[in-house]
Amino acid sequence: MSINSCPNCNAKEYIKSGVIANRQRYKCKKCNYYFTVNKLGKKIDDYYVNKALQLHLEGLTYREIERILGISHVSIMNWVKKYNVKRPQSTNYHPTYKILNSDELSRYFMNTDNVKGAGVIVTELGDKFMLIKWERFKE
């Protein structure tokens, strides 16, 4: 990765100043700030960020989303904080979810008893579908 300017003062005048942890270190000539080349991290596709936030809003826990999407629950927590996503508070409904392929999904909806008295949403997860259903808690 190339350095264009000092991250502290944006000056273009800098010099090499050693190596730290196998990364080149630089010193700005204007502000005497030491900096290194930023390492390239893994970038997760925006599709998975949107899906994770959507599933969070649907009431799934971070760990459940982690098991479904294969993304760390810590990353999901960080996205929720970053985008300031707030889940509406509702204690009357409890979401349950199933992962189904297209044939199973069509058979599920053929039985009308599966959708009576509940809200249902279907979202795509790669080659499968996730069905989220809200039912009132049984008393």
Image (spheres, rainbow, N blue to C red):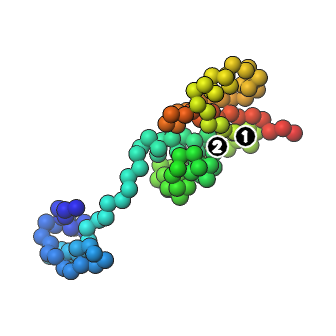
- Residue at (59%, 35%) from the top-left corner? 130
Image quadrant of residue 87? Answer: top right
Upstream in sequence: badge 1 or badge 2:
2
> Which x, y percent locates residue 58?
61, 40
Q: Residue lying farthest right?
A: 139
> Which x, y percent locates residue 39?
31, 64
Q: Secondary structure at mark 1?
A: strand
Q: Is residue 74 something one can see in this rendering?
A: yes
Residue type, mark 2 in image: Gly
**Residue at numbered disc 1:** 94
Residue type, mark 1 in image: His
> Front-most of 84 and 74?
74
- The relative height of residue 55 versus residue 35 in the rendered view (above or below) is above
Image quadrant of residue 6? Answer: bottom left
* Quadrant of the image containing the N terminus: bottom left
- The relative height of residue 82 versus residue 131 in the rendered view (above or below) is below
- Residue at (25%, 67%) from the top-left corner? 37
> Which x, y percent locates residue 119?
68, 29
Contact, mark 1 vs mark 2 (Cβ under 8 Å): yes
Q: Is residue 55 left or right of residue 17?
A: right
Q: Residue lying farthest front?
A: 103
Q: Secondary structure at mark 2?
A: loop
Q: Is residue 127 left or right of residue 30?
A: right
Q: CA distance from mark 1 to mark 2?
A: 8 Å
> Front-most of 6 and 17?
17
Q: Is residue 46 left or right of residue 70?
A: left
**Residue at numbered disc 2:** 59
How many tags in the picture? Answer: 2
* Quadrant of the image containing the C terminus: top right
